[in-house]
Image (spheres, helix red, strand yellow):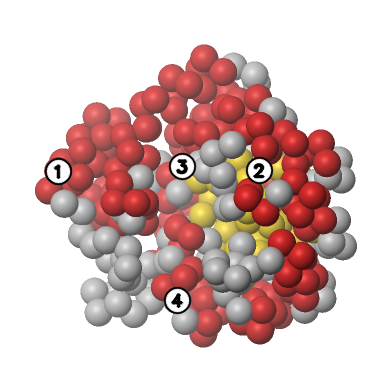
Amino acid sequence: MAHDLTKALSGISGILVTPMQEDGSIDPDRQKPVVDKAIAAGVHVLTANGNTGEFYSLSVEEAEEMCRAAARHVGGRVPLVAGVGRSVVDACRLARSAQDAGADALMIHQPPDPFAAPRGLVGYVRAVTEASDLPIVLYLRNDAIGTQAIADLCAVPGVVGVKWATPNPMKLAEAMAASDPGIVWVGGLAEVWAPPFYAVGARGFTSGLINVWPERSVAIHAALDAGDYPKAQTLIAEMKPFEDVRAQELNGTNVTGVKAALRAIGHDCGPTRPPSAWPLTAAQQDMLESFITRHGITF
């Protein structure tokens, strides 16, 4: 079925975990119950091979397999966005593979290359757009490239949205004003940062919480969509301990917190891969389990 991608991106972009065996190999089949639970709760769009999916720890072949698996698990019920990136050669290969797998759109990770020029990023994005027919969502984690460079990226044919993942709402507002008004701007720093991004005009947000407690993510989105900021802030404050665990060790426990929570609530998706931390420390685990117990979260 055809999906309204613009509308879906204005909702919750759930970033799926990549389940793994204890030996570190990927275990795609264990992702399906996570997908089913998220869709049943009302999550609007799902993303394979995002950062919560440990994209940078996967080989290109593993990333291709996880995209194919996510497409099978989603089964067309909601739009599926496939993360692509690394070298431009890898990104183009992943783009073609994602289209073949049945993804509805691509999310281009901002290249971490230390010598990435702002105008070079435009060439990178343009090359990926030419590798497939899928619409493009930019994943922007560094706004130091400047407002004009961001507007230039948004002007590349095929770009339909931006996941804004820097804690700077004013720069977000500047970028929005400088870019095509048809671009969808999505809060890319999860639930906690959604209210200030909404305040300057972004809509929707990314979420790793959807792997564990999608019902809460959906409730937060509904409150924001209704303009009920006090309710949204209350709901966010109650889930903030989860994000606090994930933010420790230079964000090195980001996926660790998600996978530790899944294990604690009864759906073990295995460990993370280095350089992500594994397991949580005793103090981190206590904080996480207190959060789970307080809210009665189960799988």
Above or below: residue 226 compared with residue 295: above
Residue 280 percent location from the top left of the image: 21, 54
Q: Which amino acid does label 4 sit on?
A: Leu
Tell me the residue that label 2 is attached to: 186
Q: In which quarter of the image is residue 174?
A: top right
Q: In front: 67, or 254?
A: 254
Residue 191 appearing in the image = yes
Closer to the chain start, of discs 1 and 4, is 4
**Cα–Cα gap, marks 1 and 4:** 29 Å
Q: Label 2 neighbourhood size at 10 Å, few (<14), some (14-19), many (20+)?
A: many
Tell me the residue that label 4 is attached to: 58
Tell me the residue that label 3 is attached to: 214
Tell me the residue that label 1 is attached to: 283
Above or below: residue 93 compared with residue 2: below
Q: In the rendered structure, are the residues bearing label 1 and label 3 in contact, judged by CB atoms less than 8 Å apart?
A: no
Which of pointers 4 and 3 indicates the residue nearer the eye? 4
Report helix, strand or loop for mark 1.
helix
Q: What residue type is labelled 1?
A: Ala
Q: In front: 48, or 296?
A: 48
Report helix, strand or loop for mark 4.
loop
Closer to the chain start, of discs 4 and 2, is 4
**Cα–Cα gap, marks 2 and 1:** 33 Å
